[in-house]
Amino acid sequence: MRIKQIVLTNYQSYYGKNIFDFVEGVNIIHGANGHGKTKFFEAIEWIFNDFDTNLEGLISQKALHNEIKEGIEVTVSIRMTVSQGNETKTIEKSFIAKKINESINITKPSLIGIREELTGERYQVDVPKELRSEIFDERIRRYSMFKGETDLKVFESKDALSTLIEMFSDATYLKNYIPKAEYFVGRAENAVTAAGRKNLREERQYAILSEEIINLRKDISDKEKEKHQHEINIEKINSSILKYENIIDNAEAYQTLSERIRIKEEEISKLQVRVRECENYTQDLFDKSWILTNYKSVFEEFKTKIANVSKTKRKLENEFQQKIGEKKAVENLKNGIIPLPIGAPTRSHMEEMIEAELCKVCNREAAKGSEAYEFMNRRLEEYIEAVEKDMVEKKQLFKNNYINSLIKISDSNDENISNLIKMESKISDNFEFVESRKTDINKKIDEREKEEAERAKVIGGSKIDVGSAATILRDFKGLNTSIKDEQASLRSLTNIIKSKKDKLTEFQDEKNKIDLVNVAGYLMKTQELLNDILTITVETTEKEFNNLVIDLEKQANEIFQSTNEGSYTGKLKLYKSKTGNQNQVEFKVLDNFNNPFALNGAQEVLAHTSLLLAISKMVKNEANESYPLILDAPLSTFDSNKYPAFFNSFRENTDQCIILVKDFIKEDENKKISIDSRFYQDDILKDKSFWVKLDENSIVNQIETTNSVVIEL
Amino acid sequence: MNKNKIFKKFISHELIKDKYQLEERDIPNNITRALVSEIPIVKTIAILVDELENNQGINDITLYNKISIYLNQNV
């Protein structure tokens, strides 16, 4: 089957009618992200999809705004025309959208199939779905259309390969002969048994033997089914174990690394808090105190002024008090009051002397009631009157003492000023501290990244977290226990089946002996010959499958080596196994010592595409039919030096492929996009190329303006 | 699948030469010749393939009767 043409009309970003005319060989569709590349891929998927949801979302927004909302009816359709055998076949899926009462009415999608014969006769088919399956059967499509690289790793599932091989190999066809041959053998045996009964001399023994044989066969069949179930279980458990193998192999290492990462994260977090605090503090110093760095001279001047003012105040105060004192003395003299001599005792001394009845000035006794005693009392009274009364009434030059407040401010700022002087070096120290902690943080981040890379290696790309690692470990232990149980059951059943088969052979030999005597030789010979035919059909089918696997492996390796020229990438190996009657083929990449070979992302994709291309060749050889491979964005992990090998492998090994890529789109400094000149180099073989891009009227973020146009390069 | 191709695949099985002692010259290379062969194993395989490929809907009983009658008379 070759795709000749695909027409997208008003589908998603494709406004109006957009035609892709394809040729045999490699068709490449370039498109930047968001320009309609994947919409094209999805359009093909949509033709084959019978479960439509959100049809309104499929309508071109430009058609919706320019036409439907203006009352114009719009048809959304995808039409695919292919050549297959001697016919041209067209399949078209469409629906109509129109505005009714301010809402959009959408018809149910319809499918039309048109068949055009070699003679040119053209007619619409009655059952378009059948024509659609004829063109591109779902089972084939599953292995022909791949969105992204992950899709391409299709052979990670054991069933994928065996399904494809069985679909296209002669083995599937030959397999139909096996039940026929089994039926013939059963009938021939019955004929022999029936004839044996008729001529029987030892009727009872023969009946017992026949019954035993029937029972044994039933038992064996039942046990085989049971065994098959255990094989399936083992297979399932094995596949679960394999799925986790990379993780489980090092699950403990995974947990250790996760713990180390957690500790590193804690350390980073602590350091970040310290840095933040220090930065805030420094910020604060800048915001609130930096302006004070020049305050020192102002403060010194302030201090000097305060000292001078204080000194002047004290001087003025003294002079003032002195004047008051002089004035008082003059008044006392005027009033006949003799001022107290210098060195007169204080009040407490006088009280002490009166108490002791002794004048300590002249060192004479002054008993109570004596003249001397009375003198001392009078002098004390005078003193109190002259000094203390005067003190109470003492006049002050300044009512308020503001100087004290200023001195207090000055003293308290003395400490601040020392801090201010140190501030510059403090800020500088803080910077150094922050920088040094930041270096520490970066170092820790590097260490954490290394640990994470290590952990990524351990988990082999699986997205598991610490919690699930613990679950996996637990499950793994459970799986190991289960597989042991299953294997024990399988061994026991195998032994039981073997012993029953031995018994069956024994009974059959015994019955054959009787038959040889009693039954006509031709019936025995017919039975034997039909048994041989059964063996031939079973073994030929098996051999056919095995040969195909060997051939496929050889072809895939040839393609794989050619796409990886100059680098060692291991060998592709296909392992065939059997679960019950079901063949399974496992795909592995091994080194020369048959150990699993670790491929990088691009190599892994190439390994799968090599096998895919080998299958494509097999299909062509075995079924005389080929199908196009349609790949969306397969190159994301590729180095550009691998592009030629990738495209060329498709050109050499398929009849047609459509590859959607963004990797050759380049953008200049003005955001103008173009196709990179590398694409036009001779080593990239292609037969036709297209470029899907938003036209110049499309405005980013205005979806109603977007329109993808198709340019044939 | 072409019936000659199917026939050739079955008739190439080692049992044909090993057990039935057939030489290369005794083994026809197409189904038309195999249908007129006098060697029971060859003709039985030919009948089986020919009948099944010509009439995919043929039932097992009819096919078995045809083969067993031939074999019972000729084996």
Image (cartoon, coloured by chain):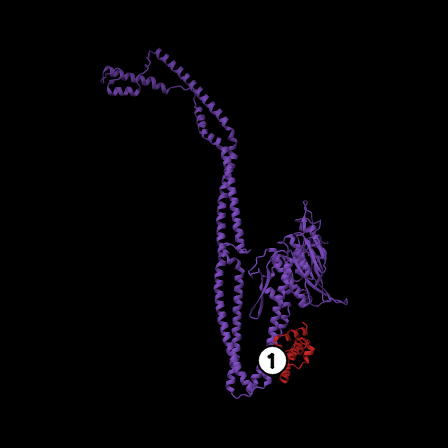
Chain colours: A purple, B red
The quarter of the image holding the N terminus of chain A is: bottom right
User: Viewer-proximal residue, A405 or A556?
Assistant: A556
As drawn, A447 above or below A309: below
The quarter of the image holding the C terminus of chain A is: bottom right
Residue displayed at 48% across by 61% down: A477
Residue displayed at 57% across by 58% down: A597
The picture quadrant where one finds residue A558 is bottom right
- The answer, for residue A375, to whether it is visible in the render is yes
Residue displayed at 30% across by 20% down: A347
Q: Amino acid at mark 1?
A: Leu
User: Viewer-proximal residue, A547 or A611?
Assistant: A547
**Circle 1 sits on which residue?**
A529
Check the residue under mark 1 and report the chain it is in. Answer: A
Q: Residue A211, position in %: x, y?
A: 52, 81
Q: Residue A195, position in %: x, y?
A: 57, 86
- The answer, for residue A102, to whether it is visible in the render is no
Q: Residue A171, position in %: x, y?
A: 62, 70
Q: Is residue A640 left or right of residue A275?
A: right
The picture quadrant where one finds residue A30 is bottom right
Q: Is disc 1 placed on a helix, strand or loop?
A: helix
